[in-house]
Image: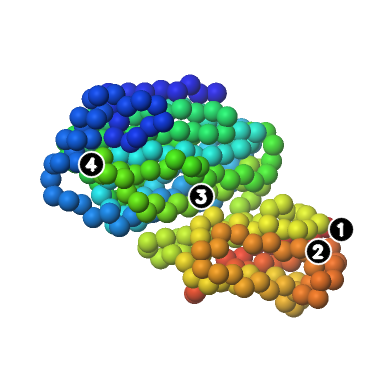
Amino acid sequence: MSRPGTHGSSSLIRHPRAISPLAVLCVVALATAGAPRARAGVTLQLTPAVQSVAPGAFVDVKLRVIESGSAFNAFRAVVVYDPAMLTPVQLSPLRSQIDTLISAACGTTFHKFGAGGGLDTISVSMLCGPVSVTGPGPIYRLRFLAGSTTGRTGLSFGPGLEFADGGITIGSVNVNGAMVGIGVPMPVLDAGPAGGGGHFALVPSPNPAAGPFRFEFLAPLAADGELTVRDLQGRTVHRNALGRGSRECAWSGNDRAGQALPPGVYLASLRCGTQVRHARVTLVR
């Protein structure tokens, strides 16, 4: 298990513990320097959104800004995962975890990283005066070691996610998680249109199962959608309308009349606008 590491001398994000006087000075200096900046929000994605690795292999994940209407020069994030499936690995040197969108803009940063127990806590602040970034681009990288248990596991953002610019918090931050298959295949995630509108997947869990199946989308639907389940003869056995912003849905394994379906392979399709995702599920009894 990795141990917390730091480098730099101050932070622009408010932490639960006391902030040093130098941090207060940095906040005041950056808040008063330069022209006011737009704060329309940030969309953050864990990438790749879907990947499959062998048991015992490294799992590399990036925090990537995929859309930003706001400049920022500091962020704090908590990445949540299943410690029984993934073990954090701290990179060396620690500063190499700060990715290129930030490192290319500012070589002097406050950086604090803590890993373990299913939570990775990250704090990064740029200490280059009135310098900010917008994106899109990667801001941080994480590495994990996949466990020996096969299956699917998710990574998501926990409470405490915050972006700031010049010491002023950006109010709107949208997040999309990721899914890792360990020793099992994962569906292909289409790139979709720019801006994140098509960055969703259809990931059933558990699979095979006797029902119910839970389908995760990994990102909120950008428009109203519909989940359809068909048998191998092409007959529709289930249909579920979904609202914009939905992140998941379920199927009991029964037909539209509520009757138990025979065991076998079924094709689930998720349609959102012009985008469609497919997944095969195996029903066992």
- Disc 2 and disc 1 in contact, CB within 8 angstroms: no
| Closer to viewer: mark 3 or mark 1 | 3
At label 4, counting other C-alpha atoms closer than 10 Å, the crowd grade (few under 14, some 14-19, many 20 or more) is many
Which circle marks residue 264 in the picture? Answer: 2
Is 55 or 213 nearer to us in this picture? 213
For the point 38% across and 32% down, which residue is it?
A: 15
| Closer to viewer: mark 2 or mark 1 | 1
Q: Mark 1 — residue?
A: 285
Which circle marks residue 83 in the picture? Answer: none
For the point 87% across and 58% down, which residue is it?
A: 285
- Disc 2 and disc 3 in contact, CB within 8 angstroms: no
| Closer to viewer: mark 2 or mark 3 | 3
For the point 29% across and 35% down, which residue is it?
A: 12
Q: Is residue 281 left or right of residue 38?
A: right
Q: Amino acid at mark 4?
A: Gly
Q: Mark 4 — residue?
A: 166
Q: Is residue 105 left or right of residue 13?
A: left
Identify the element where label 2 is drawn.
strand
Q: Is residue 249 left or right of residue 209?
A: left
Q: Amino acid at mark 2?
A: Gly
| Closer to viewer: mark 4 or mark 1 | 4
Q: Between disc 2 and disc 3, whose residue precedes?
A: 3
Q: Between disc 3 and disc 1, whose residue precedes?
A: 3
User: Is residue 283 positioned above or below 272 on the image?
Assistant: above
Residue 74 in the image: state x and y as whole percent: 30, 39
| Closer to viewer: mark 4 or mark 3 | 4
